[in-house]
Amino acid sequence: MRSLAISHLHLKSVFSLHSSLMASSFSQTIKPDLPEHLDDLLCSNQQQQQREECSSVTKSDEPSLLLGSPNGYLSGDSRIERAWAHWSKLGRPKLIVAPMVDNSELPFRLLCRKYGAEAAYTPMLHSRIFTENEKYRNMEFTTCQEDRPLFVQFCANDPDVLLEAARRVEPYCDYVDLNLGCPQRIARRGNYGAFLMDNLPLVKAIVQKLSSNLQVPVSCKIRIFPNLQDTLNYARMLEDAGCSLLAVHGRTRDEKDGKKFRANWSAISAVKNAVQIPVLANGNIRHMEDVNNCLQETGVEGVLSAETLLENPALFAGFRTAEWVEGCDENCRDGNLDQAALLVEYLKLCEQYPVPWRIIRSHVHKMLGDWFKIHPHVREDFNAQFKLTFEFLYIMVDRLRELQVKIPLYLKDSPASEISSNG
């Protein structure tokens, strides 16, 4: 596996990216207050130090020259051909990290990429706050050279505001993605995500605005309607408006609990057959057999995983948690990897690419949830930490190992656990 180590020049370019993102501002900037709790602070002051350091970076070191721009999208004679030309240029990724609020940030994306993910979404970014608030942009959007292909996802209900936000990130991503799938109450209150399904003319206007004014293609992530025909009409409308790639979560807006409601792969398959652009599937992905089954049953170009990746970032490398060993029989073996080892790798990436402590706290709970069940007193000590430090977290992992907690991740020897990235 290739190393994620970066050169001094590359470190400067990563943070030069931040400087260029922050450079432009509106003549009248509104700066909403953001919480100042300790968990909202960056886990390291490294970012500020290196941003100051990159003030002397020459033009030849600017990140756009290192990261590249998505010029392949402009080839092809028709809009559909351009959509496929761009997807092919990216290598037709099949294994993709889904967008997760506060959970699909740069260090986690890099960890998942090390273990098989071929593309990733950022967390959902609020387009209005992104355009107005420098602190929000600085803390919530980071990327680097290894972080491609990349979808940058926004929630929005104003075409002009979203376009302003999208223009800030388009040099550093491969798609600007519109979140049309968030079903949470905050999305209802803010009138975005899946609640825009009630205002399809606005959705169409947003997609048309982006697709007509960006150099990077537009993608959309949707949920299905209870009525299949409504879903197909929705997908075709998005395609006609200029959407170049469609990710379909196979649950309705009301089916929030992924463990209670199975995703409807048949509906995803119907969408795939109804449009001409690339389609991705989201839902029911717990291990690589699910990946293979989903690809076969739906015919889509790739799959997204969210909740399962949070517990097991090595999912796409064929590893599975003990919960999904049943059915493996004698074909499953200890993969010589566990969630504690993955957490340590994640923490080291966070030291390299700082993120707010609240994000790290969330990942610790997800990756060590089963370990904490065995020794709840360790979880209680963790929860009692008003101020987290890397030293405390590394010691906590050592403590769990000294308590002889061993919950391995498993590999299945069968070829069914493997997938070709090109097939």
Image: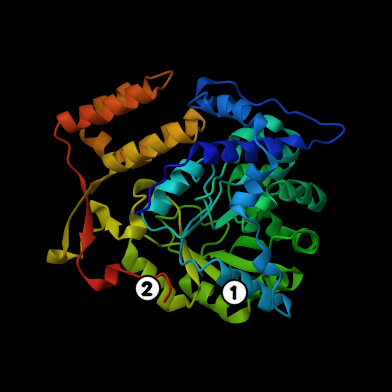
Q: Position of residue 130 (x, y in %)?
A: 70, 39
Q: Amino acid at mark 1?
A: Leu
Task: Kindly state the secondary structure of the residue where label 1 is placed.
Answer: helix
Residue 317, numbered circle? none
Residue 293, numbered circle? 2
Say which of marks 1 and 2 sits in front: 2
The one of 116 and 387 positioned closer to us in this rendering: 116
**Residue depicted at 65% across the width and 35% down the height:** 57
Q: Amino acid at mark 2?
A: Asn
Q: Position of residue 141 (x, y in %)?
A: 60, 41
Residue 246 shown left or right of residue 416 in the figure: right
Report which quarter residue 174 is drawn in.
bottom right
Residue 228, numbered circle? 1
Q: Residues within 10 Å of mark 1 (few under 14, many from 20)?
A: some
Q: Position of residue 135 (x, y in %)?
A: 66, 30
Q: Residues within 10 Å of mark 2 (few under 14, many from 20)?
A: some
386 over 320 or under it: above or below? above
**Residue depicted at 63% across the width and 79% down the height:** 276
299 over 51 or under it: above or below? below
Q: Position of residue 95 (x, y in %)?
A: 44, 63
Report which quarter residue 214 is drawn in.
bottom right
Q: Where's the N terminus, which quadrant?
A: bottom left
**Residue depicted at 72% across the width and 59% down the height:** 198
**Residue depicted at 34% across the width and 56% down the height:** 315
